[in-house]
Amino acid sequence: MLMNLRGHWTTFVLDLLYSEEGEEFVMMAGIGLFVPSGRAWRMTIPPVLTSETVKNAALAFARTEDREYILHPEQLVTCMSRAEAKVLQKQVELFQGSRGEQPYRLQ
């Protein structure tokens, strides 16, 4: 996931259906590291993180498993098409640029 930040300032687009990153993201959202923010998600620090929270996130994700033993992270988070996500990503970058914010680029 972090490597997706390389070409962008503060945003990344994930493929929930065809990558393990979707599974990782759903677990991080489940424990409160990401919260919904409009049409996107914002990284945050959860006020409290307990083993019970992690267990509940794992169980919620496990309940998305279908008859063919495939997990469905898209059932737990709001999704949009890749094209919509790329447009939103560009809008965020333009907004940040218009405010004079300098990007932090990973080396």
Image: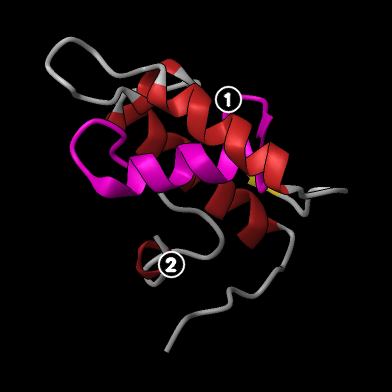
* Secondary structure found at label 1: loop
Q: Which mark is residue 39?
A: 1
- Amino acid type of disc 1? Arg
* Secondary structure found at label 2: helix
Q: Residue at x 87, y 48 (%)?
A: 47
Reading the image, the residue beneath label 2 is: 2
Left/right placement of residue 104 relative to residue 53 reads left
**Which segment did they paint magenta?**
14-41
Q: 22 or 63, which lies in front?
A: 63
In the rendering, at what x and y percent does residue 107 appear? 42, 89
Q: Residue at x 28, y 26 (%)?
A: 71
In the rendering, at what x and y percent does residue 91 appear? 53, 42
Picture quadrant where residue 42 is located = top right
Is any part of residue 67 visible from this angle? yes
In the rendering, at what x and y percent does residue 13 appear? 38, 45
Residue 86 part of the magenta-drawn span: no
Mark 2 and mark 1: span between their CA atoms? 21 Å
